[in-house]
Image: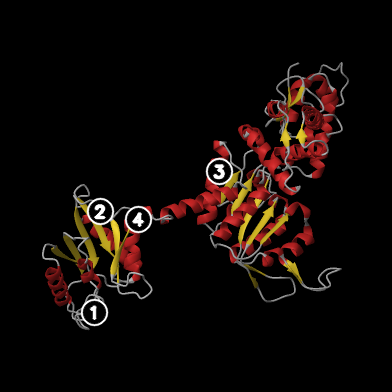
């Protein structure tokens, strides 16, 4: 509604076709028709028009329009502004000039109501006016006039006032809704309360919606890398970034020639059993998305071939001269530390640089303990949908006991979301065999199973010797890993033998005797010093009198 105490100020373009008087007095003229409605008295009309040019006498049309308006509405103050549009269909030029016009105009919204007439001008000019109004660069509303229309009940010419901020779905609201929809997709419909996880998902959304570059998903086993890759594909498909299929492969399941054939394809007869041509995964992903899970498992040779295909967007199949062109977006996943793999020469540095344009680490469950209550509900609902919408509930204190246990320090959750999911669904199956209620007995049974599993896992991962010294038969662990990379097989075996001999001695002095096969009562030389210097030359340091393994230092001597 208009405020009767404020002035009505209207802005509008000059219509070369719609405002001219040619065609008779009965011809509908858009700008003129605004002044034929007494209920909408316009106090000031700002006409935006071009300067005089050889192609068109703009001043004549302006005078004609202003004269007719003055005849219809003598009380209206008419003002003209020169704004030249070299190309009225150039969005960049039109938006910039209207933006500058609004920036340089002094608006007084406390005493005036503003309207922008959009029934004249090009479609680009109309769109730019809408955007500037919606963003409040033009602090008013939109005015649209219309001619006689036999389909309208009111067959007289009229007008419509539009406020972009009152439209059910404005541009800004629609964009916000689309962003929220992408977040829901990336979270698989799950509502998280964990700030770290929510922040990562928001970053992934921006990368998925606004970029075509490769995304690298890092994280421990079970953190949801494969699921997240599929969700990224769904977001990109909604944004029309991809049109093809989602193709995925676990690189740990392929190696050697099988990896080459799987990724790049093969021709009939290339392999035993190759009875027909087979397109590789890269070709199948053309126009879509390729997800390479556990990419760190690929051999260096296959990595080199993959890098070339990514960079050139084409590759060749052995025996075929023509190149196969592909265009796909790629997501990679791994639970390995690829930077460390590069230092160990197990992964190509140039390939890592190519695939880690966007890199996101999904947090393990132990860093998302505040999400466990919601995750339990989410997995129960998921199980119910998979089983004919069965309604599974927890007994009164059973859920409390489960949640308290799930957040205790003894809860390893090494399998992360996958392990939690399996645990919850097992309880659902137990409940379904009864009254569809997860009782305290079911919870205690599952807690017992998890504790047993975690004790087994802890024992399997626990060093055999609490003191940190590996058993004698585990010879490879005796040599620092940084040294192993630089040793030939013969040198490694010799050094392992030396370290074994040293470990049999109770002190560095005994080790020296054993190394040089000298009787223990010989006192001709300082064999402790001799042994230390000899082993220092082998890049192994012994500052004490006992062997022990230290992180980052390898095998060292320690005082008992």
The residue pinned by badge 3 equals 200
**Of tags 3 and 2, which is closer to the observer?**
2
Residue 460, percent across and down? 81, 32
Whole-Å distance between the Cαs marked 4 and 2? 18 Å
The residue pinned by badge 4 equals 134
Give the quarter of the image for residue 487. Answer: top right
Mark 1, secondary structure of its residue: loop
Whole-Å distance between the Cαs marked 1 and 3? 61 Å
Residue nearest the observer in this picture, 381 or 123: 381
| Outermost residue to the bottom | 23
Residue 433, percent across and down? 83, 38
Residue 41, percent across and down? 19, 60
Whole-Å distance between the Cαs marked 3 and 2? 46 Å
Residue in view at x 82 percent, y 28 percent: 464
User: Horizontal placement of 417 versus 27: left or right?
Assistant: right
The residue pinned by badge 2 equals 2
Upstream in sequence: badge 4 or badge 1: 1
Give the color scheme: rainbow, by chain, secondary structure or one colour: secondary structure
Residue in view at x 67 percent, y 59 percent: 304
């Amino acid at each position: 509604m208009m405020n009767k105490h404020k002035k009505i100020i209207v802005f509008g373009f000059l219509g070369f076709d719609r405002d001219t008087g040619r065609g008779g007095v009965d011809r509908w003229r858009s700008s003129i028709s605004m002044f034929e409605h007494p209920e909408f008295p316009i106090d000031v009309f700002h006409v935006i028009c071009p300067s005089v040019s050889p192609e068109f006498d703009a001043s004549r049309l302006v005078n004609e329009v202003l004269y007719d308006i003055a005849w219809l509405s003598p009380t209206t103050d008419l003002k003209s502004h020169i704004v030249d549009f070299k190309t009225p269909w150039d969005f960049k030029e039109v938006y910039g000039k209207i933006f500058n016009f609004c920036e340089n105009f002094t608006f007084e919204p406390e005493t005036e109501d503003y309207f922008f007439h959009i029934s004249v001008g090009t479609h680009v000019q109309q769109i730019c006016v809408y955007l500037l109004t919606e963003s409040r660069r033009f602090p008013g509303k939109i005015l649209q006039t219309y001619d006689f229309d036999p389909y309208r009940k009111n067959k007289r010419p009229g007008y419509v006032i539009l406020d972009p901020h009152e439209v059910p779905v404005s541009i800004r609201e629609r964009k916000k809704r689309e962003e929220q929809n992408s977040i829901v997709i990336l979270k698989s419909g799950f509502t998280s309360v964990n700030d770290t996880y929510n922040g990562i998902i928001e970053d992934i959304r921006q990368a998925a919606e606004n970029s075509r570059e490769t995304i690298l998903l890092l994280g421990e086993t079970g953190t949801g890398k494969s699921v997240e890759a599929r969700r990224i594909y769904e977001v990109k498909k909604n944004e029309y970034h991809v049109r093809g299929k989602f193709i995925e492969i676990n690189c740990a399941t392929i190696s050697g020639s099988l990896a080459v054939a799987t990724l790049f394809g093969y021709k009939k007869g290339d392999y035993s059993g190759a009875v027909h041509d087979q397109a590789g995964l890269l070709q199948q992903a053309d126009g879509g998305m390729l997800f390479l899970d556990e990419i760190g498992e690929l051999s260096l040779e296959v990595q080199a071939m993959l890098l070339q295909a990514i960079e050139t967007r084409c590759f060749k199949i052995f025996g075929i001269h023509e190149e196969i062109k592909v265009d796909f977006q790629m997501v990679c996943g791994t639970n390995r530390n690829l930077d460390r793999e590069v230092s160990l020469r197990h992964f190509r540095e140039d390939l890592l640089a190519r695939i880690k344009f966007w890199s996101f680490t999904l947090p393990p469950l132990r860093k998302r303990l505040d999400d466990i209550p919601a995750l339990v509900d989410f997995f129960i609902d998921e199980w119910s949908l998979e089983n004919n919408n069965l309604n599974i509930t927890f007994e009164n204190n059973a859920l409390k006991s489960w949640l308290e246990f799930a957040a205790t320090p003894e809860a390893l959750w090494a399998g992360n979301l996958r392990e939690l999911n399996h645990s919850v669904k097992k309880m659902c199956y137990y409940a379904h065999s009864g009254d569809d209620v997860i009782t305290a007995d079911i919870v205690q049974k599952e807690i017992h199973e998890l504790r047993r599993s975690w004790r087994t896992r802890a024992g399997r991962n626990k060093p055999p010797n609490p003191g940190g010294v590996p058993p004698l038969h585990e010879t490879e662990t005796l040599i620092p890993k940084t040294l192993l990379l630089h040793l030939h097989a013969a040198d490694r075996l010799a050094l392992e033998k030396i370290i074994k001999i040293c470990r049999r001695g109770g002190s560095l002095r005994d080790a020296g005797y054993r190394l040089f096969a000298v009787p223990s009562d010989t006192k001709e030389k300082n064999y402790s010093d001799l042994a230390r210097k000899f082993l220092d030359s082998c890049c192994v340091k012994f500052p004490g009198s006992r062997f022990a393994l230290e992180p980052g230092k390898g095998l060292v001597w320690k005082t008992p």
